[in-house]
Image (cartoon, rainbow, N blue to C red):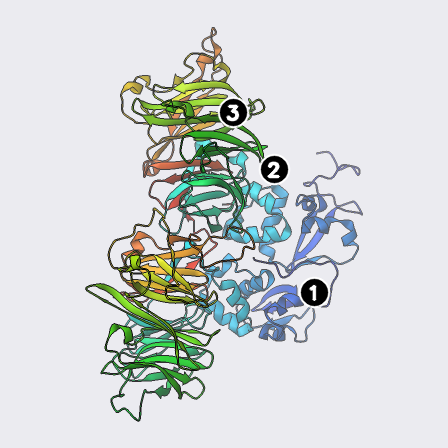
Amino acid sequence: MPPFVDDILPSSNVFIQKKPESSIITIDVGGQLFQTTKQTLAQAGSGSLLSKLSNPSSLSRPDVPFIDRDPEIFSILLSLLRTGNLPSKAKAFDLQDLIFEAQFYGLESLLVSSQSNPSQFEAFNLEKSLILPLNGRDSPSAISTTPYGSVHVSHGSKITSFDWSLRRKSTILTQFTAIDSLLALSQSVAAAGATDFSGLQILDLDRGFIRETLNWENSTMSSSTVQAIGSSPDFLFTSFESGRRNSSSIMVFDIHGSFCPVVEIARCEIYGAEIDSAIPATKLRWVSSLNMLMASGSHGGPSGVLGNIRLWDIRSGNVVWELKEKMDCFSDVTVSDALSAIFKVGVNSGEVFFADMRKLNADNPWVCLGDARKGNSGKKEGFGCKIESHGNQVFCSKGGDVELWSEVLMGSPTSSEDGLRGRVFRRNLMGRVKDVGGCKITNLAFGGNRMVVTRKDQQSVEVWQSSVRGF
Amino acid sequence: MEESHSSFTPEIGPDNRKIKLNVGGKLFETTVSTIQAGGPDSTLAALAAREADDSNPVFIDRDPEIFSVLLSVLRSNRLPSTARRFSKQELADEALYYGIESRLKSVMAPSPLIGIDASLVATIRPAADGFSSSFTAGAGDGSVWIAHGGQISSYDWNLTHTGTVRTHLEQITSIRHVWPETAAIGSETAAGLHFYDFSGGRHVGSVHWTDPSDPRIYKGRIIAIADSINSVFASFECQHRENCILVIDKSTLQVRSEIGRLSGNSTKNMVPRKLIYLPESSVIVSSAVSSGAFGFSGYIKLWDTRSGEMVWETNEPGSGRSNRFVDSFADVDVDIEKSAIFKVCSKSGDIGVADLRNLSDDPWVYLEDNNPGIRNSVGVGNSIINCYRGQVFVSKDGELEVWSRIKEREGMIENVFEQGSYRRNFVDKVEDSKRGIINRMEGGGDRLFVSREDVEGIEVWESSNISGATSLW
């Protein structure tokens, strides 16, 4: 081991005792003395109480700074500062205690990233871990998450928000009788809409009032109901349908600031009997790799379910790609940027299909990942199935179960004449034997290191996560 | 909401002097301002102020673990999870010893009661004669006095049983909190209004309805009791159904006046089963409802307590809109802050609201809600209405629902009497409604107390910011 040189750069783990102007700091917390380094305290961030302690100007006084707080919890938070993780002794406390003390010291963001970091999401290691009860008798209708794992659930006319730790909740009342679309814009702001209520409302979830109501002025001058909400880093997308159900449109709003309308795309109106021409989009997903918006919609008619999937270029307002679904139309669609593919679950077959986004021009881009023959059986096995992508995986609900689809990366392209044909996807049924089944899944969402599930007639939210350190 | 009350400041002010305490052999170090957070005159502040030096800190001969919980409360104004190791009673007793009970009370109090997000947290069951015949949460701090059989049991802000008084009555049917330690009670089977004092556990006075000019006024029984700062109001009924409201001076326990004498020979003049005092206008609202083969019928009368005159009355069926003819009210309550009187319609389950400052022949505005989650069961149900904390709680048989106002904009002026501004939601779950018919509801502190027919004890409903997540690991 090389000896310490005097001008070596001190890092947080190096203990330098020789230096006269040492970076070691002694703090007295509630009567207990702690020694650490300025570098460790600096991890707390510039505005925090602890980094002020490491600031030499406040240390001009000769005595040890005293903080009148609980020393035991401080020792846990000091470990968090040192290692970025909670020590296992933290389990002796309630997470609420740690959050509250972390807020006092200005360390909450460190605690959040140690407990609910999206990078800790492990699709293959998710277990059913928590049930969050909802008061009252309404079952959840829509759900939305934030990147660090707070969860907003609409049930009846109410929205209940759980914070990132899922330990605290708050509930607000809205004007809607039932909310069909919900999108969290931040920890405390959400966009909500319903298919039987005019206008998209931007709600302040902390104080429970409406910030903005966004409407679409349609040609029939009727109300504008909300069919779907989506967002990109810059825009908020809303699929509106007129109250008379004869026209629809996607409005693009500026997500920063005052939600000004930017552009209207996909306006279509029904003329005569061509009902298919104006199916409103019921799902909007931003495809960041293509810089385009995926919009899909379907409706059931006498000849079965018909639908379309479109990719829109927001700047030009043009459809870049469109797929009309006539045979085995999707019951749900999602886009995976990481896998650069569109996935659907067929309403008749109940099977998962994928379409490679690098090869969309083919006549039928769908590749069935199961038994393709089932599509012709007139049954509606895929009815109500949900499909969502998160990270490198695709999650598809079937009844009360969730299937996890992942790509198997083969060492070499199996068929050299067509490199894409060789893509291999495999499925797993999620959960242990005791977790399989249950009431039909109505919503799937992802946030932080968790998957969040709601089920039909269950006044609760189910959380799946992998066991993390600390809690 | 939870503000930290102590914080590190580099400049040592007079209050941030460090102080060492030796509690039961364990050393604690804190500041004078933290110690005084429980009140500068608390026992703890006095104990800590004794002469001591660093090597020989102040010694307090109490349990160090509970002290660490209480110190945490003083430091951060929040109950730490370590408090779960102790019962609420232990914490309260220890806080009482240190004289910091008010601080503990504020951190242990439930979150503000929000009907749309409330759940059943406890059922208080008196040990014997557990069927509550009446209860009062009038103290307003979340405490409740339960009348069961001939006993009154009191439960404090912590819902800890603090005592039971056996009264001379066999069956108490009305109870009202009139002084911090005094209850007014009455029975439908025995005469008179009686006052019992908790601290002494004894009877302190009685009031009977007498009329020197009318010998038939004899052995009047109590049907309802209301309370104001200076007076107690009680509706009395005699054997021959004649009835009145007596105004009783709270300090002398003497009858001050008699108002609203009614013959009791028809629905329109039967004895009031509900009395509500409106302090702003010195008006007492009396109402009675009876149900029969043809549905509900009843009246609401407003009496000026100073003149004894009737100010306003309505009878149902009879007055009001004709399309509501078969939908007469089942119960009435007043939101005193908003000067609004609410009634629940017996058939539709709709809520009617009227402005007390502007009453006319048909003052009602009907609140309707088309929440598809709430089925309006057709037919006459047993409904109770209770206005509390700006919300309207309504029971229908065993079901409990709440009508809450929508906040539309920040700082919007509230108009209570506007149609469509309320939403109706269930408070309970289906399982809860199966326990029995709700026969009484009352709010107190941030709690809603509910009792059910033929069910022992009373239910306590609270709201919470805690998610109540159950772990499956």
Depth check, mark 3 against mark 2: the one in front is: 2
Mark 2 to mark 1 CA distance (whole Å): 44 Å
The reply, left or right, for residue A210 in relation to residue B151 is: right
Q: Amino acid at mark 1?
A: Asn
Q: As rendered, which of A365 and B90 lies closer to the eye? A: A365
Q: Residue furthest bottom?
A: B212
Q: Chain letter of disc 1?
A: B
Q: Chain letter of disc 2?
A: A
> What residue appears at the point 31 percent right and 90 percent down from the top-left corner?
B211
Q: Amino acid at mark 2?
A: His
The percent position of residue A132, horizontal first and vertical second, equals: 42, 47
Depth check, mark 2 against mark 1: the one in front is: 2
Q: Amino acid at mark 3?
A: Asp
Report which residue position mark 2 lands on: A256
> What residue appears at the point 52 percent right and 58 percent down from the top-left corner?
B80
Verify CB contact (< 8 Å) between mark 3 and mark 2: no
Q: Secondary structure at mark 1?
A: loop
Assign the N terminus of chain A to one quadrant of the image.
Answer: top right
Q: Chain letter of disc 3?
A: A
Any part of residue A464 in sight: no
Mark 3 to mark 2 CA distance (whole Å): 24 Å
The reply, left or right, for residue B63 in relation to residue A464 is: right
Instruction: In the rendered view, tell whether residue A299 sits above or below residue B6.
Output: above
Q: Give residue B16's mark.
A: 1
The percent position of residue B7, horizontal first and vertical second, equals: 66, 59
Q: Quadrant of residue B428?
A: bottom left
Instruction: Say whether disc 3 or disc 2 marks the residue closer to the N-terminus.
Output: 2
Q: Secondary structure at mark 3?
A: loop
The percent position of residue B187, horizontal first and vertical second, equals: 29, 79
Report which residue position mark 3 lands on: A337
Instruction: In the rendered view, tell whether residue A253 sits above or below residue B120.
Output: above
> What residue appears at the point 56 percent right and 50 percent down from the top-left corner?
A99
